[in-house]
Image (cartoon, rainbow, N blue to C red):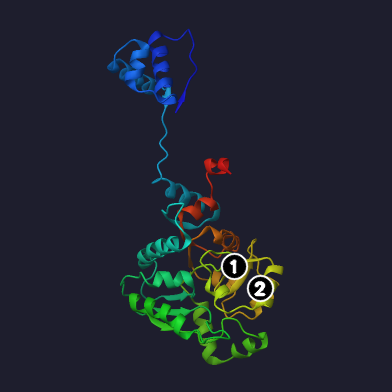
Amino acid sequence: MAATNSASSLPRRTRDALLAAQMYYLQDLTMDTIARELGTSRSTVSRLLSHARDTGLVEITVHSPLEEPRRIESEVRRRFGVTAHVVPTPDRMNESDRLERVALTAARILGSFFDSNMNIGIAWGSTMTAISRHLRSHPTHNSKIVQLNGAANPHTTGLLYASEILDRFGRAFGMSVQQFPVPAIFDDPATKEALWRERSIRRVLEMQRALDVALFGLGSPFSGVPSHVYSGGYLDEADFRALAEAGVVGDVATVFFRADGTDDGIALNQRSSGPDLETLRRAPRRICVLAGEAKLAALEGALQAGLITDLIIDATTARRLVPSDRDRARR
């Protein structure tokens, strides 16, 4: 609310309306109290306040929390050219509950992205696991799901973990599933190069290069809900040191990138089974689902890399991504 300064030259009614508005809106006095102080009736005070609003002495702005997600979505599109779906979440909600809320929303709207005669690439991880638990039936025809990166590590084949996620998607959308039974990260780049020449593997790689839609979360070493690649035994201490030295902030399907979106010279990517970032960018629609402020740096890097066309995100993290003027003033 803003009110103009009083002036003795103003008409009496305007001066009274301004005084009543200042007492009501700025001092939080009741109409009855204002009436006593002005020596008039409550109904007269009500008319003075209406006069103040009608003549522009008072301007009232309502900051509705229901409108905030729409503002954020518009700002994300303006700044990054990305279609955002902002999920309302209380700021005090913990990251685990926030992930569940975002995953539930993502599961409900994926049917608008998945259709018949499509190749859908899906990366495994904590976010995809959460989404898979909430999927609704939306049958398609002649569509395929292809696993984007291997899931094996020195402790497990990863087949049960990855296949459970993919099978849930396959059943929900009536799609056949193409698994990718290779290590998430190879010990030796030469082993990967040799395996990539095998016809059975080349067939999966060709499917990945012909994706219509890619669906993924973002891995981050800083997340409160640990990304599976960082907590599941896929990396050793030397790998973590190499990632830190390279300035890595996150990954998509175990392909790592920096804050500026670059991935050149990151040695671990030579051993990763995930599609390189250029292959991922070829998919016309690339849906990123993200929850938690700890993943903000990974999100900013992925946006810099041009990896995302559609973003499903919690409101708290989204406000950090595109803060309003009021948010900036609070910091």
270 is higher (above) or lower (below) than 297: below
Q: Earlier in the sequence, mark 2 or mark 1?
A: 1
For the residue labelled by badge 1, is the local secondary structure a helix, a strand or a loop?
loop
Contact flag, marks 2 and 1 (Cβ < 8 Å): yes
**Percent position of residue 322, x then y:** 53, 50
Do we see residue 146 in this rendering?
yes
Image height of 17 relative to 292, above or below? above
Q: Residue at x 36, y 80 (%)?
A: 142
Give the residue at mark 1. 221
Q: Which mark is residue 240?
A: 2
Quarter of the rendering occupied by the N terminus:
top left
Whole-percent x, y for residue 230 in the image: 57, 73
Q: Is residue 251 left or right of residue 147?
A: right
Quarter of the image for residue 240 reads bottom right
Where, by quadrant of the figure, is residue 198 drawn?
bottom right
Foreground pick, 37 / 89: 37
Q: Which residue type carries mark 1?
A: Pro
The CA span between labels 2 and 1 is 9 Å
Residue 174 seen in this snapshot:
no
